[in-house]
Amino acid sequence: MYIKLATRSVRRSLRDFAIYFVTLAFGACVFYAFNSIADQQAVLELSSRQLEVIYLLRNMISGVTVFLALIFGFLVLYANRFLIRRRKHEFAIYQTLGMSRSKISFIIVLETLIVGIGALAIGLILGYLLSQLLVIATAALFNVRVEGFALYFSGSAAAVTITCFALIFICTLAFNVITVTRYKLLDLINASRVSEKLKLRNLPLAIILFIVSVGMIIASYMLLIDNGMLNMSWQFMAATILVCIGTFLFFFSLSGFLLRLVQSSKKIYLRGLNMFTLRQLSSCVNSAFVSIALVCLTLFVAFTSMCTGFATVTTLNKNFEKNTIYDASYSAYYNVGSDGLGDNPNGISDMMLKQASADNFNMEQAFAKRVQDWNKLVSQAAQIDFYLSNHTLGDLMKAMDYSFNNVYESVNPDGLIKEPLYVVKLSQFNNLRAICGEKAIMLASNECAIWCDDDDFTAFYSTWFVEKNELAIFNNNLGLAKDSPNSYTTLASTGSAGSNVGIIVVPDHVISEQLYPIRSILNIKYNGSRTDIDAHFEAAVAKTFGNAWINANINNSNGGNYGWPYLSGSSAQQFYDMSTIVTATVTYLAIYIGFIMLITCAAILALQQLTQASDSASRYVLLSKIGTSERMVSGALFWQTAVYFVFPLVLALAHTTIAMSVISDVVKLFGSLEIALPLLITTAIAVLVYGTYFIFTYLASRNFARN
């Protein structure tokens, strides 16, 4: 009999609260699909580097799964609270007929098991299908092929999903049993007659609290924009506290504010069912303002996560081609060596000076002499030497009383002031532009040019030449070249776009032959496609020099490598692999975290509205008896549900827009971050998911009203 009662209750709950069960199944689906990524190697031809990315992603997803399981567990407990509340009258009937509380608890245990097993089974099936789509997405991301059409099942992902849901439903079971055993029979009988009381009855108080909440939110925005996200000062903490308190206060005052505000206009308040709709909405918001505020803040985190993820991926993909003009880049640092710094200009290591001088400081010549098949592997190479000028950025900033925006100054203000100003020779700069396919530039003997790919620093140098007209470099007064752009953005080395904060290009005669460079970069283009040449080239260099960084820091008295002809190097393929790591990690984690949070928030709002509609069934009956048409009731439900869903969404999107604008300022230190398109994509996804839940919630609420 108890099994029959439990089965009938579950079947009835599935009809009334289908959103709850669909959400559970979808949660299990997403948990399985994303935790199965580590096993995709079974059907994908992945290289050792790509496997490292997969293993890294697996570890990160495993950690995130624990966090998301806690959030999802909260959703399940929260949903069960509303389900139990709706069934109070049913439990009262059971007790009136003589059923003990222990028997009622046993029925609840059976219902929980049926629901849990059913949702988990459906979720695993859907997750299995979704994981096959993720295989295709991963293959496209890593540019590899799938071995035929091979379906695979991840036992580890299934184990993780089952474990998470088992723990969630054990907690849910305990919560349900404890809740039911604490209810008194009289409370259960009168449950449907209990209604929420509005705490805000005073119009001036409601308006004041609402205005204060809006003021606090705006103040938090201003503090965050002014302070940025890198400087954890009192302003950042104040912005965080203000936005949280302001959000809670916003929804606390919203119920009374809306009701009293519309009441001030009798024409609107008395039109149709507006009076009934506003009181229903106010009652619901008033009783659940804490959960609505939490939903809003959770949506903010979800939107920021997804938007940042999409923006990062979009930026990386967009910048990859222009960041990898050269097939490989190698750098030599002349002040590095285990023998200590010498007394020569710029403090160059004596051993490094000896080795570099033997090759006339020509990196290509040194490579060609030592690396087998160099001339066969390399078609073009251009070296550029960087010299320390007699200025620092701090000198120039002080001379014209200039300060950068708070992002740069908050990172390392002392480092920014002490940042040396480098100069390069015009001939080498034109050689570099030549292999990039760019035209050579011309400079008179008393002219210079700015080489910079950062807008803020370009403005800084431009301001200098507007105010001072010239810059003294090694006792040569140089003005900015006429008819030249504010700066040249030629790529300095592979993967370095967005990191050149300003170099002065000068005529060759300005740099004395007695000066030594502080650093040199050799940019290389292969004699063939990267796919064919890269592995052979790296193997040839590694065979000759091994680990250049380790060798440069080992005291080798037998004349070993001390950082010449290079100390560090990178290839376009390595940069591509690194970009793939970031792209894969950020994309999957952003979608994983964002979707779970998004469906959790939408489900909570949906369940609250369904419970409100269920509890108000008698009121809809009364409306029907006094002659209200079904169309008017449906319209009232539509607007009530729409307002309930829209307010948290709009406020969360406002928080996200401000946060993303600040994040984009931070990312400008490493390259531009476009947020318009990612924010649009995130909004579209939110509207799609939200819209789906809204439609089902409205239809289910209308069904309650009709019945």
Image: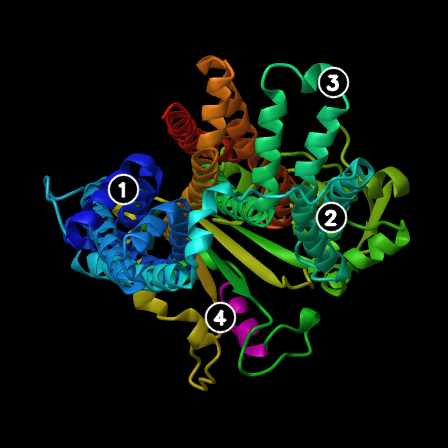
Label 2 vs 3, first from the N-terminus:
2
The secondary structure type at the circle numbered 3 is helix
Which residue matches tag 4?
563
Identify the residue position indicated by label 3 in the image.
Answer: 266
For label 1, count other residues whose C-alpha is less than 10 Å away and answer few (under 14), some (14-19) or many (20+).
Answer: few
Residue found 84% across the figure and 58% down from its top: 395
Q: Position of residue 227 (x, y in %)?
A: 74, 53
- The residue lying furthest to the front in this view is 97
Rendered position, 349 above or below 116: below
Q: CA distance from mark 2 to mark 1?
A: 44 Å
Which numbered disc covers residue 220? 2
Q: Give the amino acid at mark 1.
A: Asn
Mark 2 crowd level (few <14, some 14–19, many ≥20, 10 Å Cα): many
The kind of secondary structure element at disc 2 is: helix
Label ID, residue 143? 1
CA distance for labels 4 and 3: 83 Å
Q: Earlier in the sequence, mark 4 or mark 3?
A: 3
Q: CA distance from mark 1 to mark 4?
A: 35 Å
Depth check, front residue: 456 or 648: 648
Q: Which residues are magenta?
A: 350-359
The type of residue carrying mark 3 is Lys
Is the C terminus in the top left, top right, bottom left or bottom right quadrant? top left
Q: Can residue 44 be seen from the camera position used here?
A: no
Q: Amino acid at mark 2?
A: Ser
Q: Say whether disc 1 or disc 4 marks the residue closer to the N-terminus.
A: 1
Disc 2/disc 4 C-alpha distance (Å): 50 Å
